[in-house]
Every structure is written in structure tokens, then in C-alpha cells.
Image (spheres, rainbow, N blue to C red):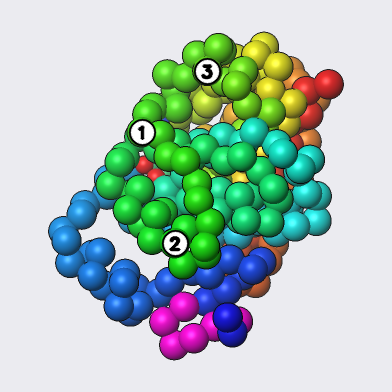
Amino acid sequence: MPDSTPHSRRYYGVTTLLSSHPDMRRLKRTGLATHLHGNKLWGSAYLLMDYLHEHPLEPGSRVLELGCGWGLASIYCAKYQQADVTALDADPAVFPYLALLAEHNQTAVKTVSGDLTALSEKELGEYDTLIASDICFWDEMSEALYQLITRAIDAGVKKILIADPNRPPFIDVAEACIDDFFAELLPREINARRRHSGSILLIENA
Ligand SMILES: C[S@@+](CC[C@H](N)C(=O)[O-])C[C@H]1O[C@@H](n2cnc3c(N)ncnc32)[C@H](O)[C@@H]1O
């Protein structure tokens, strides 16, 4: 497949569809309404793919993407990192978009509808790696995300990667994780259709 067509683009080997693509137009015409900002691909997903391109996961990793939206990072991990990927979102209206993109990328991602803040230690313990992009955009999300990270660490999740455009609620979580879990906050910037910048919160649980 060429790098881009009039209605699609390709980044890190993953095809994304523009809103002008006939399949995307068809899906939008069904009146499927997303809420919680799952209405498009967000730039931080590209930051996450860029990081994973340079720092691949261990083959066979069991990956859970939190607040997956249209699931670009999940598709990347399933297609190029030999990962067993589950994509979770509180808004089931995002999944037809994820399924459409997965189909165009000839790959498969399992999806689960659920609230990431309600995931138990037992449920989190089924995964080696948690990934996420742009999931901490309201002040009230900070504490819930911090508590989720704490449960994941207690559950033995080995790696947590969260990309964000440096929204203040995310920075609050990142600072707490640096203090409590020896996390790193890695600045990142890329050019994909337009410039995206932000950080990757990396927590490695030895
Ligand atoms: C800004 S979008 C980012 C989507 C995707 N990660 C990306 O980077 O393109 C935030 C996503 O998080 C989901 N979300 C928000 N709160 C959530 C929660 N408590 N549990 C699960 N998903 C949630 C929304 O439905 C939405 O799809």
C-alpha cells in the first residue's frame, strides 16, 4: 500500500483513514455518536507509536490499551510488535471505528467496553504492559489514574506507557509517579500530518 492516498495516510506502517474516506463517511452517516472525546485520532497516539518503534515491546507481550478510542496504538502493537492486544474504552461507540481501522490494517484487536478506573488488581494482573494516550484530560481523572497505576504495579504489570500532550492533570499524575514509582517523563515530538508534542510517562516495574 502506498504511503498515502487521497483518503488515507500511513504512519509507522499503520494506515489511518481521513474523514473523506468512503468507509469513514459511511460509518459517520450511521449517526454513531461518541462522547468522552473518542471522536477522532488524537496526536498522542502517534507519540506512543513513535516511542514503541524505537523501544519495542517483548514479543508476545499481553497488552491492554486504556481509553483506546480508535485504537491506533493497539493496531500498531498487534501488527508490528507481535503483541496480544486488548483495547478498552468506556464508550462502545468508538469500537466500530477501531474495527474499521483494524480491517484496513489487516489485523485484529480484542475490544472490551469498560471504565478503566474500575479495573481490579486481578484484572490488571492479566497483562504485562499497559499503554494509553491522552486519557487524563480532566482534573478529576488524575487521582483515578494514579490509583489505577498503583493497582497495576501491585498486580505485577511490568511496564506502563502513557503518552500525553502534557495536559496539567496528566503532569500531576506523572509527578506523583516519579516520586512514588521511579517513573520517567520522556519528552517527545513528531511530525505526522502535523506536529505533535508531549511526553511519555514510562513506569518499569522490576
Ligand atoms: C482523548 S480520547 C483518546 C483516544 C485514544 N487513546 C487516542 O489517543 O486517539 C480519550 C478516550 O478515553 C476514553 N475514556 C475516557 N474516560 C474513560 C474511562 N474512565 N474508562 C475508559 N475509557 C475512558 C474515551 O471514551 C476516549 O475514547
Compared with residue 154, is residue 69 higher up or lower down, i.e. above or below?
below
One can see residue 22 in this view: yes
Q: Which residue is mark 2?
A: 103
Q: Which disc is residue 123 wearing?
A: 3
Compared with residue 57, is residue 126 higher up or lower down, i.e. above or below?
above
Residue 160: quadrant of the picture:
top right
- Residue displayed at 16% across by 61% down: 30
Label 2 or label 1, whichever comes before in sequence order: 2
Q: CA distance from mark 2 to mark 1?
A: 19 Å
Q: CA distance from mark 3 to mark 1?
A: 14 Å
- In percent of width and height, residue 84 lies at 61, 39
State the extent of the magenta-drawn residues as a range: 3-8
Q: Nearer the viewer, mark 3 or mark 2?
A: 2
One can see residue 147 in this view: no
Kind of residue at badge 2: Glu
Residue 114 colored in magenta in the image: no
The answer to whether marks 3 and 2 mark residues whose Cβ atoms lie closer than 8 Å is no
Kind of residue at badge 1: Ser
Compared with residue 71, is residue 202 higher up or lower down, i.e. above or below?
above
Residue 5 colored in magenta in the image: yes
Q: CA distance from mark 3 to mark 2?
A: 27 Å
Q: Nearer the viewer, residue 90 or 143?
A: 90
Secondary structure of residue under mark 2: helix
- Residue displayed at 23% across by 70% down: 26
Label 3 or label 1, whichever comes before in sequence order: 1
- In percent of width and height, residue 49 lies at 66, 56
Q: Which residue is mark 1?
A: 113
Residue 184: quadrant of the picture:
top right
- Number of numbered discs: 3
Q: Nearer the viewer, mark 2 or mark 1?
A: 2
Label 3 or label 2, whichever comes before in sequence order: 2
